[in-house]
Amino acid sequence: MEIRPRRLRQTPALRRMVRETRMDKASLIYPIFVREGIGIVEEIPSMEGQFRYSIDRLPQALEELQRVGVGSIMLFGIPEESAKDEAGSCAYARDGIIQRAVQDIKSRYPELYVITDVCLCEYTSHGHCGLLKGQEIDNDSTLEILAQTALSHVQAGADMVAPSDMMDGRVMAIRSLLDAQGYVTTPIMSYAVKYASSFYAPFRDAAGSAPSFGDRKSYQMDYHNRREALKEAALDIKEGADIIMVKPALSYLDIVREVADQVQVPVAAYSVSGEYAMIKAGARLGYVEESQMICEIAAGVYRAGASVYLTYFAPQIAKYMDEGRIG
Ligand code: PBG
């Protein structure tokens, strides 16, 4: 008798047993915005459910994270508007917003894994990610400032730095300075594959980092390109990147897969602010069901090959994992 081909009929227990994609909370990173001031928790208008915190109010968010078992954060700093200048010098100030926030967080929660975003756009008066020469970004003069910024974060206690500026050579500049200063074991997660994307709009509102003229297309990637992603990843690994990030996530899952197949280091994917905002808006209108959508997208990101996942939904995902809905 010939056996008829058939699909495995899965009961809930069997479905969990044979899942091809496994995820765990340890791979989640929660992005969080910290601003100057005291006693401030302000909701970000285009990112319902996400807040800007002054340093003294961060514990409110961090304790909730600890409760649900998310152990890693990515910090973004929002300095006073008046502190910004052409050269982004408040990015590497010893008493800058990130430097003080990291010190405070590490003194209260030494086990929390603190990653800092290294970029100049939140700190420059013009909102670009690098220094300007006329209307153009001056790649090479930016490198030293980025390296100093990364160093100041690590000196404040950051466990890992994540350069997101997309200047050429910045991973090498950061690695060299960290090594020279004795921080040889501090890893670098590079936003290596970062597309020029409309999905960053809510973030730029949140961080007040929209460019005052032009766009970021001269330094971020063109979304028509696929092979360029592999080249960017390879270059950053050569310069010393320990983890390679692809960003955004949802429209770039093919890129996540391809990079994950090609590189020998862990790959991170970042579901960015616009992805978050879309789901929140859709759910608020009753057009989509939020929790199911969060689970499905998270599974898709890991299935594509990411082993680290940055998402504003990290606390919810951790809860859904506990409930056995995904994971
Ligand atoms: C800084 C930076 C951006 C994001 C992360 N780091 C904004 C940008 O490049 O314009 C976006 C994150 C998000 O949209 O959630 N350069």
Image: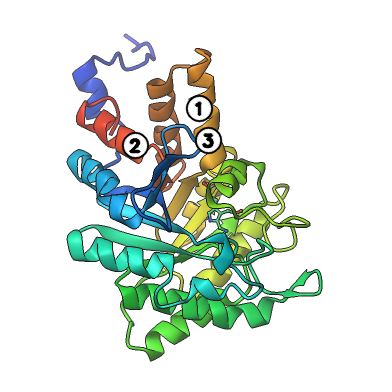
**Above or below for 62 versus 314:** below
Calculate the distance from the C-alpha at mark 1 to the C-alpha at mark 2.
23 Å
**Which mark sits nearer the N-terminus, 2 or 3?**
2
* Tag shown at residue 45: 3
**Which mark sits nearer the N-terminus, 1 or 2?**
2
Residue located beneath label 2 in the image: 21
User: In the image, 211: left or right of 82?
Assistant: right
Find residue 16 and report its image quarter: top left
SS under mark 3: loop
The residue carrying pointer 2 sits among few (fewer than 14), some (14 to 19) or many (20 or more) residues within 10 Å by Cα, namely some
**Above or below for 61 versus 293:** below
- Amino acid carrying label 2: it is Thr
User: In the image, 254: left or right of 109?
Assistant: right
- Amino acid carrying label 1: it is Ile
**Which mark sits nearer the N-terminus, 1 or 3?**
3
1 vs 2, front mark: 1
User: In the image, 290: left or right of 80?
Assistant: left
Q: Nearer the viewer, residue 72 or 243?
A: 72
Residue 306: % across, % down: 42, 48
Residue located beneath label 1 in the image: 279
